[in-house]
Amino acid sequence: MIQYLRVGLILLSAAAEVGAGAWTLPHGQLWSKLTYFQQRTEEWYVGQGRFGASGTRARYDFDGQYTSRAVFFEGLYGVTDRLDLGLQIPYFDQSFANAAFPEPRTDTGLSDIRALAKVRLLIKPLVFALKAGVKVPTGDFKNEDGLIPVGEGQWDFDFVGQAGRSFGPRLLYGNIDLGYRVRTRNEQIDRDPGDEWFLNAELGYQLGHQLMLLGKYEVLRSQPAVVFGGIEAEIKRITYLTPTLLYAVGQRTTVEVAVRFSLNGRNFPAGRQLVLGLATTLGKNGD
């Protein structure tokens, strides 16, 4: 039961990754962002071995309902014009209830911290950067049936190529990230969660002096998890489409409003998520 709930935590953590595509910050500039996620759903994408075909969107057993709220604080600092260092600190409040539980199963607290380094290699004919990140198992991991832990209990390492381009004189830009995540074994429960690859594509258009419209497309695919010394378990799949509005407040602050719609998946909660964000920069202005 817990597997198709825990993966919701995994994707939320990945979805709010620090960084603004392939572009890097000017030397000495600090970018920070506070993001709020909210999801409530009674459906999930069926995994292998469950009723119906794999990937079928179905209701949770026993009228189950999954609720997740998360807050991410992110920071990115321009060490040089070509090198950024970043940090993400997440907080989760999650619950799952169904008719078989006398009361909802919940867990709340700080989750696993992520750190990253990004180096820009090209600026023409497109912006290209390489990013490496690590997820540290700092969140409280509890291996209890029916409990949704805020931490995953293992280290992850991300390796990402990022390419972006501004299509001037049109007020249009595009960015695409392609990455691979190495996920180490959770020794506490003898579980290898399976490595993942992910694709994040983004297209943005300036609607006015203060307003920008973005379209985001996110894909995550995993290798099978391995448990109990060699038994293959679930494979995770999810695809999201996210229309987003950005509103500039002055020259340094941006308000973000978005809705993430799940398109298909496997062993993931289905439905939509509300996303609210507030970002600002300190230090000298970028070019």
Image (cartoon, rainbow, N blue to C red):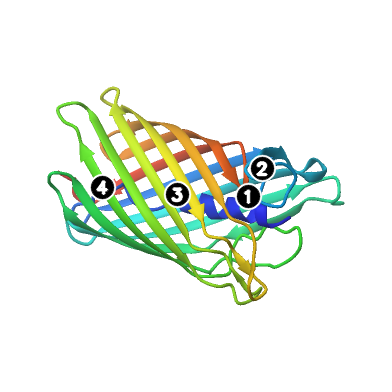
Q: Name the residue under label 1.
A: 267
Q: Which residue type does callout 2 highlight?
A: Trp
Expressed as whole percent of the image width and height from the top left, the position of residue 168 reads: 16, 30
Instruction: Check disc 3 and give the amino acid type.
Output: Ala
- Please, what secondary structure does the residue beneath circle 2 have? strand
The secondary structure type at the circle numbered 4 is strand
C-alpha span from label 1 to label 3: 20 Å
Position of 170 relative to 130 (above/below): above
Query: Do the CB atoms of the residues marked 2 and 1 lie less than 8 Å apart?
Result: yes
Distance of label 1 from label 4 (alpha carbons): 30 Å
Alpha carbon distance from label 3 to label 4:
18 Å
CB-based contact (under 8 Å), mark 4 and mark 2: no
User: How far separated are the C-alphas under marks 2 and 3?
Assistant: 21 Å
Q: Residues within 10 Å of mark 1 (few under 14, many from 20)?
A: many
Along the polypeptide, which appears first: circle 4 or circle 2? 2
Label 3 belongs to which residue? Answer: 16
Sequence-first disc among 1 and 4: 4
Label 3: state its secondary structure: loop
Q: Mark 2 points at which residue?
A: 44
Q: Check disc 4 and report the residue beneath it.
A: 163
Tell me which amino acid carries mark 1: Asn
Res. 42 visible in picture: no
For the residue pair 42 and 90, the one nearer the viewer reads as 42
Q: Where is residue 157 in the image (x, y as percent from the top left)?
A: 42, 66
Q: Earlier in the sequence, mark 3 or mark 4?
A: 3
